[in-house]
Image (cartoon, grey):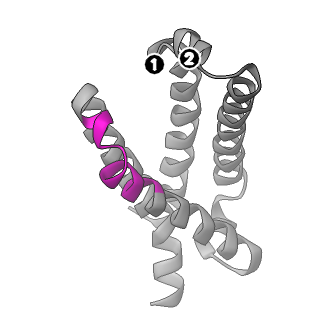
Amino acid sequence: MTVSTGIIIGGLLSVALAIFHCSFYNFFNWKDDLKNVSALNGRLFLTLHIGFIVVFLFFAFLSFAYTEELSQCNGLAGIITGFYASMWLFRTVWQVTYLKQFKKEHPVLHYLLIVWFLVLLAAYTAPVAVKFL
């Protein structure tokens, strides 16, 4: 597998993650749960969540439209690739260490997400590793 292929796979996984996030409201029963917080906090929570969907779609677009630039990791493309790889490293660690309750309630999804995040981490770390190692 080439670095460019990894970037394309990362873009596809980012789109899939955005689509998956669109199901969170019903999947996690947020309609009932958000009744327990203030209206402002509920709106802020949903706004941040929608923001994540936009970020995932933005990185998917970058991955498809600028595959070669991201895979070569030059200039701004290197910063973008490194940032996205760092985000997936953080998210993987967060899933394993902080979201232990998630593992109890949704064990299959918990481990699926860890694998998903590791593939995204690998896809966006590969160009940085090839460039600097």
Q: CA distance from mark 2 to mark 1?
A: 6 Å
The residue pinned by badge 1 equals 28
Q: Is 58 placed left or right of 60 in the picture?
A: right
- Callout 2 crowding tier (Cα within 10 Å): few <14, some 14–19, many ≥20: some
Question: Which of the labelled discs sits on residue 16, or is there none?
Answer: none
Query: What amino acid is labelled 1 in the image?
Result: Phe
Residue type for callout 2: Tyr
The residue drawn where x is 36% and y is 55% is 118
Residue in the image at 59% along x and 22% along y: 22
Was residue 67 drawn as part of the magenta stretch in this picture? Answer: no
The residue that label 2 is drawn on is 25
Q: Looking at the magenta stretch, what is its main secondary structure?
A: helix
Callout 2 touching callout 1 (CB < 8 Å) = yes
Residue 106, x across and y down, in percent = 28, 27
Q: Which residues are magenta?
A: 91-103
Residue 66 location in percent, x, y?
Answer: 71, 58
Instruction: Work out whether residue 48 or residue 88 is closer to the camera in this orientation and state it.
Output: 48
Rendering quarter of residue 89: bottom left
Q: Local crowd at mark 1 within 10 Å, few (<14), some, or many (≥20)?
A: few
Check the image and report above or below for 70 versus 43. below
Question: On screen, 48 above or below 117?
Answer: above
* Up/down of 19 relative to 132, above or below: above
Q: Position of residue 102 (x, y in %)?
A: 32, 34
